Structure formats: C-alpha cells, structure tokens
Image (spheres, grey):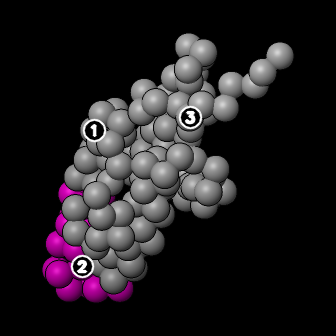
Amino acid sequence: MTENTSPPDASGSDASGGISDNGKQLALLNYILYFIGFFVGVTALIGLILAYLKKTDAVEWVQSHFIYQIRTFWIGLLWLVIGGLTSFVFIGYLLIVGWVVWTLVRCVKGVLRLSDNKPIEDPLTWIW
C-alpha cells in the first residue's frame, strides 16, 4: 500500500479526493472569532492563541492569513490602548471608531482572500 504524498491543491482537496487539513478552516474560524470579538472580547484572544499555535502547521498561503490575524490583533490592541488613554478628549473616541473600521476592513479582506484560496499579499502591513 502506498501513501498519498502529493500536495493538496488550493481548494484543500488532496489527490485522492479527500479534504486535507491545510489550516484554511481554522483561519476562517479565527476571522469569525475576531468578528465576534467586537461583542465578546475574549474570542479575539482565543483567535490570537490559535493563530500562534497553528501558523507553522498550515500551508504557506494560509500562514500569511495567520500572520495577518496576529498583526491585526496586536496593532488593534495598540489602537484601543491609545484610544482609551485619550478618550478624555474627543480624539480617543475617533481612534476607537477608526479601530472598528480598520479591523472590520482587515477581517473582511481576509475572509474574501481566504475564500478565493489566495494569500494576504503583505501580511505585515499596518494599513489594510
């Protein structure tokens, strides 16, 4: 009996027709956890931990999503801390609103690229 060692295609199916575990589903779960994190903050932290634990196990194009998710969390936390510290003046509230928009755009972009089986082109970006 020979073992199937052929790499999975971008759709996540291996040559035998089965579904391989390339990390795509977990990356999608992380985006969902980030969306839920707007209402239940701890879910974003769970997503961060999962991204750190699974990024090396995933295929390369999915790794870019995990890196992007990790950066989204830490940069977003920086926005929130600065916004919270400056909330006694109006600018803090603007920063928090900016964080919400920025995070939503990054998560939607990530989900769309993930559903198209595409990597994040520049997962280290601070912008979108």
The mark found on residue 7 in the picture is 3
Which is more toward the observer, 25 or 98? Answer: 25
Could you tell me which quadrant the C terminus lies in? bottom left
Q: Between label 1 and label 3, give the one nearer the viewer.
A: 3
Q: Residue at x 68, y 25 (%)?
A: 4
Residue 108, compared with residue 88, is above or below; it is: above
Residue type for callout 3 = Pro
Residue type for callout 2 = Gly
- Residue labelled with disc 2: 92
Dot 1: few (<14), some (14–19), or many (≥20) neighbours within 10 Å?
few
Question: Which callout, 1 or 2, points at the residue further toward the start of the chain?
Answer: 2
Provide the residue span drawn in magenta: 85-103
Judging from the image, what secondary structure is the residue with disc 3 in?
loop
Judging from the image, what secondary structure is the residue with disc 1 in?
helix
- As for residue 28 lying within the magenta part, the answer is no
- Residue labelled with disc 1: 112
